[in-house]
Amino acid sequence: MTGQVPFSSDDSITFGQGVEFAENPEPRVPCCLVLDTSGSMKGQPIRELNAGLLEFQRELLTDSLAAKRVELMVITFGGVVSVVNEFQSVEKFHPPAFSAAGQTPLGEAVQMAMNQIQVRKQIYKANGIAYYRPWIFLISDGAPTDHHWQDVALEAKNAQINKAFLMFCVGVHGGNSDTLRLFTTRDPLRLCELRFRDLFRWLSSSMKAVSRSIPGEKVNLVNPVAPDGWATI
């Protein structure tokens, strides 16, 4: 991981009407969190994940520009895939406390994230709203139990090559990095111990940096695998 990631807004912009965007015409930074809530996350892992999400919201709210520009969606997969939060501003984002149960339909969850990002892009375009390249941020043990997940992984990788979105994959306590690597063009990360709060502080800092940037310019991100970082490769 180089620590520098280029971001750009799409060139195709049209104009329309919408109360949401009329009140806040700022460019958007869409971030879709795809969170494993399967049975393997039971106990301390799911508790730390919940605490990390609350920290994530608090940190973003301290930055007035990020609060206007960053939009969050949450998709969980634990037995079933659920859209917990549609894309919405940080101020409206109120993460619930998740519980862990069920299997790991990882492929279905990533497919849902890609579909939702495409829909959101079309909404931006229809309302004349510029946007930065979306993020998909996946946290999982990396052991999918659904069918055809390999096809979804290939689709996700090709979409990243075509700059449809950026994708970060984080493996939790013994997560299968070889599996996660199939979904992303960058090295998957391994979460050190259960440092979810540090992870989400890094993610909020990254979202703030992107929201303050000019579309198309490179943004320096803190290296999460530095000696004092929250992850390893």
Image: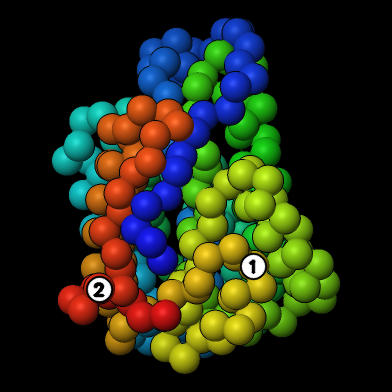
The percent position of residue 26, horizontal first and vertical second, equals 39, 20
Q: Which mark is residue 104?
A: none
The quadrant in which residue 182 appears is: bottom right
Residue drawn at point x = 38 percent, y = 86 percent: 43
Furthest residue to the bottom?
174
The percent position of residue 5, horizontal first and vertical second, equals 42, 49
Q: Quadrant of the C terminus?
A: bottom left
The quadrant in which residue 82 appears is: bottom right
* Circle 2 crowding by C-alpha within 10 Å: few under 14, some 14–19, many from 20: few
Question: Nearer the observer, disc 2 or disc 1?
Answer: 2
* Circle 1 crowding by C-alpha within 10 Å: few under 14, some 14–19, many from 20: many
Residue drawn at point x = 47 percent, y = 79 percent: 171
Residue that carries the numbered disc 1 in the rendered image:
183
The residue type indicated by label 2 comes to Ala
Residue that carries the numbered disc 2 in the rendered image:
226
What sort of colour scheme is used for the picture? rainbow
The percent position of residue 183, horizontal first and vertical second, equals 64, 67
Looking at the image, how many numbered discs can be counted on the residues? 2
Say what secondary structure mark 2 lies in.
loop
Q: Earlier in the sequence, mark 2 or mark 1?
A: 1
Above or below for 108 versus 225: above
Please indicate, yes or no, whether residue 184 appears anywhere in the rendered image: yes
The residue type indicated by label 1 comes to Phe
Image-based side of 180 in relation to 159, left or right: left
Please indicate, yes or no, whether residue 76 appears anywhere in the rendered image: no
Above or below for 127 versus 110: above
Above or below for 192 versus 126: below
